[in-house]
Image (tube, rainbow, N blue to C red):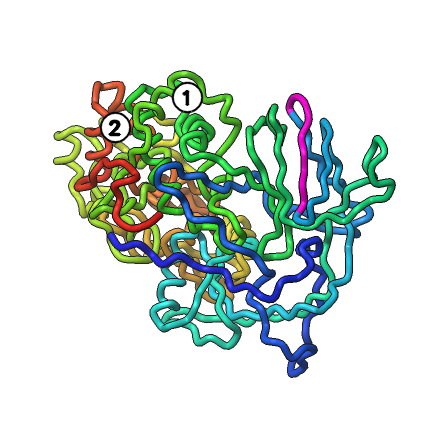
């Protein structure tokens, strides 16, 4: 597998760091350009540092887009940083210090010394980073410096007026930013500064007893720094192995059998390395929610999780010396999906459609799965691995009104929906293209855009059954995209006595388990 190019943020001249926050923008009238300087694609940021193979440290955003979302800065709730025990300390880019058991930082709107012209060509939105990455690669193949952003949904950005790759449409986003939002520290107690002080980012935060954040406690150290959209991010600098303590129990559950926990640890480690460029445009590696891997309080890991991580320390799953696309999901419903059934892009040899069950099951439900056999799989597939998962089988009801609302949320519409039709299925039986027919036209949803639009659908492994006029019953199986490891399947296999290597080889055939330091190329 070839390493994908690392996107590098395009930086403009440095603005006062205190002002790099949620922007107040003025749209530029057509034909009018208020400043003569070239437009910047985004607010100035710096990419996170490269990872050291001997001791990788991830920059993980515990929170992003910090700042008031509505109303004035004066009425916005302050940003509160609370030490779990003892005190914490903050030092900004100018060397100004604040410390205490908690810090309350206020938001202040401040004019920019010089207006900032933001202008870019935009592809998207995309349903996932993976699909956005494929679009970025298509642009880069044309010699265009493409960057992946996540202002609300995944998008790909390039210099304004860049010609879109074949098969894509680009829109122009241009605005003049005249002010930003700064963070202000109140007057220091005990003889320090008697006036509030604007702080300059990035800010470094240490909390020896941990920082309490959204119900958890995180060791740190931390950074407060601006992102590419004019907001701020709270980032923890986390050693890779400690990061896994906060991921493994939240992704697969701390009570899973040891071999399943070890498999999840290897995959979470591999996924983090393979996706370390995911938020490079914002100055960090990974987020802490479902757009990355769920990362929570590492204290909740427990002994079994810690032992699984320790037993696999530094080990990753590779293909031709590179970290694989270590995707995983809750349950595949009895049949794994190929990469190309989920995201745009070429098939991967280790992520292929295949039945996920004992030999007799695999012989009965061979792939490519004929459409006529899919009802049998959904009705009689209980012999599959992980069949006891609560969403191994499911049903949903979609009404015309729900469909209309779901399409409207994504900025599309077909009038009053009158029909749903599966246009194409993949080798695993999953829906690759779904047509929504309406009084005002037709819209075809493809791959991951299906679940992005109809979020009530646990997977794309389903049948359409007319229920009544204006309503369709969806009969399906599985929860998640279906590619790679099924967590329910891994738990089942581990309980049957399968080893770590056998589980990984089953879900990622042809891959190798190897230490990070032996991977090809720099991290």
Region rendered in magenta: 84-92
Q: Nearer the viewer, residue 143 or 15?
A: 15
> What label sits on residue 254 in the rendered view?
1
- Residue 277 placement (x, y as % from top left): 43, 51
The quadrant in which residue 25 appears is bottom right
Q: Are marks 1 and 2 in contact (CB under 8 Å)?
A: no
Q: Mark 1 or 2, which is nearer the eye?
A: 1
| 480 relative to 291 in the view: left or right | left
Count of marks overlaid on the render: 2
In magenta stretch: residue 310: no
Q: Secondary structure at mark 2?
A: loop
Which residue is found at the position 17% from the left and 28% from the top? 358
| 374 relative to 458 in the view: left or right | left
Is residue 320 among what the camera can see? yes
> What label sits on residue 355 in the rendered view?
none
Mark 1 closeness class: few <14, some 14–19, many ≥20 residues within 10 Å: some
Is residue 375 among what the camera can see? no
| 394 relative to 413 in the view: left or right | left
- Residue 216 placement (x, y as % from top left): 58, 27
In magenta stretch: residue 85: yes
Q: Nearer the viewer, residue 359 or 190?
A: 190
Which residue is found at the position 55% from the left and 72% from the top? 172
Residue 265 sits above or below residue 438 on the image: above
Q: Earlier in the sequence, mark 1 or mark 2?
A: 1
Which residue is found at the position 36% from the left and 66% from the top? 138
- Residue 401 placement (x, y as % from top left): 55, 51
Residue 107 sits above or below residue 309 on the image: below
- Residue 265 placement (x, y as % from top left): 35, 30
Furthest residue in direction bottom, as rendered: 31
Residue 390 sits above or below residue 302 on the image: below
Mark 2, residue position: 385
């Amino acid at each position: 597998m070839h390493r994908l190019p690392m996107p590098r943020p395009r930086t403009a001249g440095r603005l006062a760091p205190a002002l790099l926050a949620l922007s107040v923008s003025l749209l530029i009238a057509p034909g009018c350009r208020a400043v003569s300087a070239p437009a910047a694609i985004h607010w100035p940021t710096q990419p996170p540092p490269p990872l050291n193979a001997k001791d990788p440290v991830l920059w993980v955003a515990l929170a992003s887009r910090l700042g008031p979302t509505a109303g004035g800065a004066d009425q916005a709730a302050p940003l509160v940083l609370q030490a779990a025990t003892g005190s914490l300390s903050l030092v900004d880019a100018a060397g100004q210090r604040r410390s205490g058991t908690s810090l309350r930082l206020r938001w202040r709107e401040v004019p920019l010394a010089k207006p900032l012209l933001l202008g870019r060509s935009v592809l998207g939105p995309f349903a996932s980073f993976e699909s956005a990455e494929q679009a970025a690669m298509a642009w880069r193949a044309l010699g265009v410096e493409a960057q992946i952003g996540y202002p609300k949904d995944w998008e790909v950005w390039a210099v304004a007026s860049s010609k879109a790759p074949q098969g894509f449409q680009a829109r122009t986003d241009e605005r003049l930013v005249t002010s930003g939002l700064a963070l202000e520290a109140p007057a220091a107690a005990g003889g320090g500064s008697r006036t509030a002080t604007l702080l300059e980012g990035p800010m470094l935060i240490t909390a020896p007893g941990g920082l309490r954040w959204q119900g958890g406690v995180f060791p740190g150290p931390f950074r407060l720094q601006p992102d590419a959209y004019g907001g701020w991010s709270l980032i923890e600098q986390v050693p890779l192995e400690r990061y896994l303590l906060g991921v493994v129990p939240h992704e697969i559950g701390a009570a899973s059998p040891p071999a399943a926990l070890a498999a999840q640890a290897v995959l979470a480690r591999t996924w983090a390395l393979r996706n370390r460029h995911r938020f490079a445009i914002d100055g960090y590696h990974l987020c802490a929610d479902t757009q990355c891997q769920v990362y929570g309080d590492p204290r909740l890991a427990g002994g079994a999780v810690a032992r699984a991580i320790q037993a696999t320390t530094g080990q990753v799953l590779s293909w031709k010396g590179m970290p694989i696309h270590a995707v995983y999901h809750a349950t595949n419903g009895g049949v794994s999906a190929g990469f190309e059934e989920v995201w745009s892009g070429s098939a991967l040899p280790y992520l292929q459609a295949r039945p996920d069950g004992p030999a007799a099951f695999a012989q009965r439900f061979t792939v490519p799965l004929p459409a006529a056999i899919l009802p049998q799989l959904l009705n009689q597939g209980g012999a599959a691995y992980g069949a006891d998962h609560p969403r191994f089988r499911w049903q949903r009801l979609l009404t015309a009104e729900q469909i209309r609302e779901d399409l409207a949320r994504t900025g599309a519409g077909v009038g009053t929906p009158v029909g749903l039709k599966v246009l194409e299925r993949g080798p695993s039986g999953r829906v690759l293209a779904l047509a929504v027919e309406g009084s005002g036209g037709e819209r075809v949803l493809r791959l991951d855009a299906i679940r992005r639009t109809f979020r009530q659908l646990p997977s794309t492994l389903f049948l359409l059954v007319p229920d009544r006029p204006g309503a369709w019953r969806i009969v399906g199986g599985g929860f998640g995209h279906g590619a790679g490891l099924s967590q329910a399947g891994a738990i089942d296999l581990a309980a049957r006595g399968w080893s770590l290597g056998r589980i990984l080889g089953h879900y990622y055939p042809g891959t190798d388990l190897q230490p990070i330091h032996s991977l090809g190329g720099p991290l």
